[in-house]
Amino acid sequence: MTTFNPSVRFLQQVRRLVVGAFLMAIATMVSAADLKEDAIKKDRNEIEGTWRIVAIEVNGNKLMEEDARKFSVVNGSDGTWSLLSEAKEISRGTSTIDPTQKLKALDFTPTDGEGKGNLYLGIYELGETTRKMCFAPPGRERPTEFSSTSGNEQIFVTFEREKESAIKKDRKQIEGTWRVVALDVNGNKAMEEDAKKLTVVNGSDGTWTLFSEGNEIMKGTSTIDPTKKPKTLDFTPTEGEAKGNLFLGIYELGETTRRMCFAPSGQGRPTEFSSTPGSEMILLTFQREKSK
């Protein structure tokens, strides 16, 4: 006859609990790491491009705007950067970011030019077409706020995305196939199943093709200005209905969705995303089609 030892059962339960907790901790760590990588990738894409410096404060002293605007920075999607003064490169380097911190963290090191080899600790903030950056001299702790005073010796920089860079960024984001998921014309909402019959294929050069149930019905060209508020869109059909007419609109971009509102040809540009009876405005909502 086998004698049951309660201590063995207890140890087995403890072991299962420890293993379970360990596996859960690993899963949580992996999930957190994935989220961090996604956040880094998202902000890297936002930062990529050319930015004009519009304000600089050093140790509490504000530079004249015309002097600040002589500087621009070209950011790569891999964290590399190049600082230019009146279009001439004066420094370049690498950077790392952590958007998951309460104040998004930025560390950068010049690899050429002034400050070569030094590590600078900073914080950053991203807007649609602007960004802020505050950093400390080498050897000093990371800033805890966006400020520059005679006491903290911090450098506070404000950037504005260059128009051509902003256009390139939005063109890249718009490129691809989009399904219409909502359509309002002069305040009348189309049935969802009818709206979803329409798709648009956008090229990176501003060309577009409109399909209804897979059949091409119109194509044309467009220009955008992402520096306006709201962002503006002008398009002209080159084939199909309304060929040669110019339509003035506005647009808004999400990660996988976008909105567009435009007026009939010959009318003024909309000032808001709405379509009401009598306005004659056309409001569309798109959803990006998944790649097959």
Image (tube, rainbow, N blue to C red):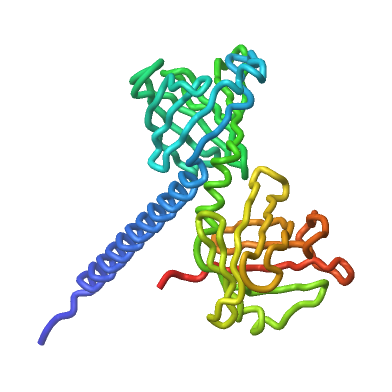
Whether 76 is drawn above or below 176: the answer is above
Q: Quadrant of residue 139?
A: top left
Q: Is residue 8 toward the left or the right of residue 184 in the image?
A: left
Residue 280, image x, y percentages = 83, 68
Depth check, front residue: 94 or 288:
288
Depth check, front residue: 197 or 106:
197
Whether 71 is drawn above or below 207: the answer is above
Q: Is residue 64 toward the left or the right of residue 87 in the image?
A: right
Q: Quadrant of residue 66?
A: top right
Residue in view at x 63 percent, y 51 percent: 224
The outermost residue toward the bottom is 1
Residue 236, image x, y percentages = 66, 61
Residue 255, image x, y percentages = 55, 59
Residue in view at x 52 percent, y 39 percent: 104
Residue in view at x 44 percent, y 53 percent: 38
Depth check, front residue: 117 or 2:
117
Image quarter where the N terminus lies is: bottom left
Depth check, front residue: 49 or 246:
246
Residue 63, image x, y percentages = 63, 15
Whether 241 is drawn above or below 163: the answer is below
The outermost residue toward the right is 278
Whether 241 is drawn above or below 73: the answer is below
Q: Is residue 95 toward the left or the right of residue 180 in the image?
A: left
Question: Could you tell me how many numbered marks the image carries?
Answer: 0
Image quarter where the C terminus lies is: bottom left
